[in-house]
Every structure is written in structure tokens, then in C-alpha cells.
Image (tube, helix red, strand yellow):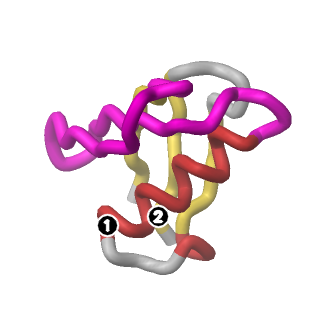
Amino acid sequence: MRIFVTAKTNAREEAVQKIDETHFVVSVKASPVEGKANIALIKILSRFLKIPKSQIVLRSGATGKKKVFEIL
């Protein structure tokens, strides 16, 4: 299953906003330097979706705000 995420970095607090079944807006405190924000996104998504972090893979958008994750 693929999910589409709009990332908001350097946020005051971490949050997940569900738009529909496959689209989310995720705010993270981490800055987009050296992949720290991507790691934080995976951590927050795993907590929100109640699945292990190892089951979430970033498929595209590593350097942009629009990202595609695959749930294994």
C-alpha cells in the first residue's frame, strides 16, 4: 500500500493530519538536513499507523515536501 505525505519540517510540535485513506500531512520538529526529517517522518507514521518502522519505506521524494511511502 502506498501513502502520500506532505511534510512540514521545523514545526513547533509533531502531528499527523489525515486527509483521506492514503494522504497525510505530517509535521515534524526535525530540520531537513541529512535525512533527519525523513527519519522523524517514519517514526511518527509508525506510531500513528501502529506498525513497526521497518515496514515503512520511503519510495520517492527524499529531498522534497511531497513524499511517497510504501507500507510493506
Q: Residue at 63% across / 29% down in the picture? A: 61
**Is residue 10 placed above or below 14 in the rendered structure?**
above
Left/right placement of residue 27 relative to residue 35 reads left
Q: Which residues are magenta?
A: 8-35
Residue 71 location (% of width, % of height): 47, 64
Give me the disc on residue 71. 2
Relative depth, front residue between 25 and 4: 25
Residue 32 figure quarter: top right
CB atoms at circles 1 and 2 under 8 Å apart?
yes
At a point 31% along the width and 63% down the height, the residue shown is 48
Q: Identity of the amino acid at label 1?
A: Leu
Q: Position of residue 41 (x, y in %)?
A: 53, 48
Circle 2 Cα neighbour tier, 10 Å, few/some/many (<14 / 14–19 / ≥20): some
Determine if the magenta segment contains residue 33.
Answer: yes
Q: Position of residue 16 (x, y in %)?
A: 29, 44
- Which secondary structure, mark 2? strand
| Quarter of the image where one finds residue 17 | top left
Residue ID for mark 1: 49
Between disc 1 and disc 2, whose residue precedes? 1
* Count of labels in the image: 2
Q: CA distance from mark 1 to mark 2?
A: 10 Å
- Nearest the eye: 60 or 63: 63
Magenta run includes residue 14? yes
Give the vertical position of 63 relative to 25 (above or below): above
